[in-house]
Image (cartoon, helix red, strand yellow):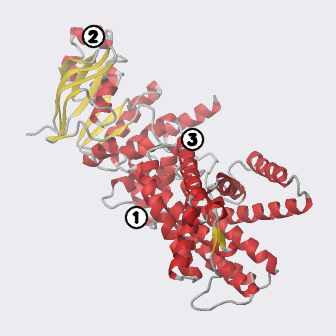
């Protein structure tokens, strides 16, 4: 079976810093993969290369067998990879529903209409349904500027989900959320994402979240993959404990 | 809105003759400023709309003299097409830039055209050249007031219809995407939308409006010269757009009329320092209405009251607000 994402010999350097050192990785459909590693280990660089924001120095990235290594973020998104951001990238002067409406416009096959109202009934219904899934329908008409960081994270993820992506990349979905709300937030994300995103890759620093929600863990260290496997195995790995988790678990 | 446009056009019947030409220019300025506002919704301001204004004006003047086309509506359409085609050529190239680079490039291009026009003797050089009085659907206007009224009515109706179109555009998918590009063009790309394409389309629409406005200015003055492309001409249009803000179509018309009135009266009472009055007027608007005149009546959709049905995570917002 062709993996949804296949990465071979991926390399990326920023001057003397090696952000990706001959990475090889296959991600099968339906997996929930967590990328872990200390700051600067290369997790976000990996996500940025997969989504077309950074061009790798060498190596290949294939989405269901199609090379996407030199594609732009727009093309990669159209091919079926969506992402959310560590710092939510939203349109802060627009409302939550308007933000999702822009995402709906981007997901449709035809171009942007010059005359169809952006918040026509059908489209409005679609955005409300999506917000409902995240438990945010009461906030549809609130400007993003008025919303808390956790809510913004959820809306950022909801926007990435509009395309029903083949692969959804979540960059630190629980960062900036208080410890007592992390599980609630992640529960909400997993529940909301399940119907639309077959495969999820999430960058995470909280090992409790990783062990509870991931069914595979990839540990990064200095641009290399240190360990790859089941959470129970990877989190017990001596090198992972030394370089990544610092003895957690 | 359409009734308002019709009423404004008929209002010209009772206006003094001297104001008809002023109102035609105000409508023409509003049309071009409307284009700037449409473009500004993508976060980019053109300081060189004189380029398309001149392209429309010169295009109409050359075609009118060469082929004898005198119809006002046809001339307006020719101006719009000339401006639009030029915008379509320049747009994709210029959309790759943003902020001050975008503004300065448009300014530079308009000054290149200005320089070329001044040096082109076949187009009358710095003196320009004249065209005949426009007609309408085969009707020749020999009476000056009737001719001025016809031009006033055509310009007001055209600008009004452009306003209606802009209102539809503002609420459309493209209109919302334009605001998104203004805020975060990279996120727009990640959503599968080309922000360059959005800017190009808005830029071209602004160029079409500027071309049509150039045609009206030409018809009103029956003369064209390189001043159409000069940077101070472009600056006036930006002035109107800044006064109006980017939220309301009606604000553009109010701002254009306000500018013409302030200029006329300050010129009348303070002939040597009227620019000072204009500057103070602009400063006052920027200071007290930073989002433009339109912000006076734009209904704020923001519901700032506490919503008790907020989900648990929203409690974080209240905590953050309380801290």
Work out which residue is located at the far front of the displayed protein and give it.
B121
Task: Tell me: B198 left or right of B99.
Answer: left
Q: Where is residue A74 in the image (x, y as percent from the top left)?
A: 33, 45
Question: Which residue occupies 43% across, 57% down?
Answer: B89
Q: Is mark 3 on a helix, strand or loop?
A: helix
Callout 2 secondary element: helix
Residue B32 in the image: above or below residue A58: below
Up/down of A50 relative to A75, above or below: above
Q: How crowded is mark 1: few (under 14 residues within 10 Å), some or many (20 or more)?
A: few
* Count of marks overlaid on the render: 3
Q: Are marks 2 and 3 on the same chain?
A: no
Label 2: how many residues lie within 10 Å, few (<14), some (14-19) or many (20+)? some
The one nearer the camera, B95 or B227, is: B227
Furthest residue in direction left, as rendered: A1
User: Which label number is shown at residue B270?
Assistant: none
Tag on residue A241? 2
Relative to A74, does residue A179 appear above or below in the rendering? above
Looking at the rendered structure, which numbered label has been put on residue A122?
A: 1
Query: Picture quarter containing residue B243?
Result: bottom right
In the picture, residue A124 is in which quadrant? bottom left
> Can residue B250 be seen at all in this image of the molecule?
no
Task: Name which residue lies at 67% across and 53% down.
Answer: B235
Q: Nearer the viewer, mark 2 or mark 3?
A: 3
Q: Distance between the residues labelled 1 and 3?
A: 39 Å
Disc 2 to disc 3, C-alpha distance: 50 Å
Q: Earlier in the sequence, mark 2 or mark 1?
A: 1
What numbered label is drawn on residue B100? 3
Whether callout 1 and callout 3 share a subunit is answered: no
Q: Can residue A15 be seen in this view?
A: yes
Q: How far apart are marks 2 and 1 (CA)?
A: 50 Å
């Amino acid at each position: 079976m062709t993996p949804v994402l296949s990465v071979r010999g991926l390399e990326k350097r920023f001057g003397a810093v090696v952000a990706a050192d001959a990475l090889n990785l296959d991600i099968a459909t339906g997996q929930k993969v967590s990328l872990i590693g200390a700051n600067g280990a290369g997790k976000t660089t990996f996500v940025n290369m997969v989504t077309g924001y950074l061009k790798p120095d060498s190596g290949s990235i294939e989405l269901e067998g199609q090379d996407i290594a030199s594609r732009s973020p727009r093309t990669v998104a159209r091919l079926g990879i969506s992402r959310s951001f560590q710092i939510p990238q939203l349109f802060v002067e627009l409302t939550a529903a308007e933000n999702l409406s822009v995402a709906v416009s981007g997901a449709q096959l035809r171009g942007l209409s010059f005359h169809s109202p952006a918040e026509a009934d059908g489209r409005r219904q679609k955005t409300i349904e999506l917000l409902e899934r995240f438990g945010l329908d009461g906030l549809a008409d609130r400007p993003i500027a008025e919303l808390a960081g956790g809510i913004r994270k959820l809306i950022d993820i909801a926007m990435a989900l509009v395309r029903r992506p083949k692969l959804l990349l979540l960059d630190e979905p629980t960062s900036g959320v208080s410890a007592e709300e992390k599980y609630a937030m992640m529960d909400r994300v997993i529940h909301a994402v399940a119907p639309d995103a077959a495969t999820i890759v999430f960058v995470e620093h909280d090992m409790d979240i990783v062990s509870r929600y991931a069914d595979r863990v990839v540990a990064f260290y200095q641009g290399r993959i240190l360990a790859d496997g089941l959470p129970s195995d990877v989190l017990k790995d001596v090198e992972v404990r030394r370089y990544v988790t610092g003895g957690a678990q | 809105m359409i009734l308002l446009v019709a009423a404004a056009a008929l209002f010209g019947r009772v206006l003094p003759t001297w104001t008809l030409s002023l109102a035609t220019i105000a409508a023409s300025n509003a049309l071009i400023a409307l284009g700037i506002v449409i473009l500004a919704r993508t976060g980019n301001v053109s300081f060189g709309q004189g380029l398309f204004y001149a392209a429309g004006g010169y295009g109409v003047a050359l075609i009118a003299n060469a082929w004898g086309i005198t119809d006002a509506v046809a001339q307006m359409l020719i101006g719009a097409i000339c401006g639009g085609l030029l915008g379509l050529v320049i747009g994709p190239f210029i959309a790759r830039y943003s902020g001050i680079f975008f503004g300065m490039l448009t300014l530079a291009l308009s000054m290149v055209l200005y320089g070329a026009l001044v040096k082109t003797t076949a187009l009358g050089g710095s003196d320009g050249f004249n065209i005949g009085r426009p007609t309408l659907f085969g009707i020749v206007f020999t009476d000056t007031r009737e001719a001025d009224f016809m031009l006033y009515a055509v310009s007001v109706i055209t600008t009004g219809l452009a306003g209606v179109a802009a209102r539809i555009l503002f609420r459309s998918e493209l209109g919302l995407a334009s605001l998104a590009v203004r805020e975060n063009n990279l996120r727009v790309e990640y959503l599968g939308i080309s922000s360059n394409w959005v800017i190009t389309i808005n830029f071209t629409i602004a160029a079409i409006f500027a071309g049509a406005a150039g045609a009206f200015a030409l018809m009103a003055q029956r003369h064209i010269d390189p001043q159409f492309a000069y940077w101070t001409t472009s600056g006036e249009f930006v002035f109107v757009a800044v006064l109006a803000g980017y939220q309301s179509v009606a604000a553009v018309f109010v701002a254009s009329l306000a500018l013409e009135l302030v200029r006329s009266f300050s010129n009348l009472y303070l002939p040597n320092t009227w620019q000072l009055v204009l500057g103070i007027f602009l400063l006052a608007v920027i200071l007290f209405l930073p989002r433009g005149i339109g912000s006076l009546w734009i209904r704020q959709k923001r519901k700032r009251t506490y919503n008790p049905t907020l989900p648990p995570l929203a409690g974080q917002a209240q905590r953050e607000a309380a801290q």
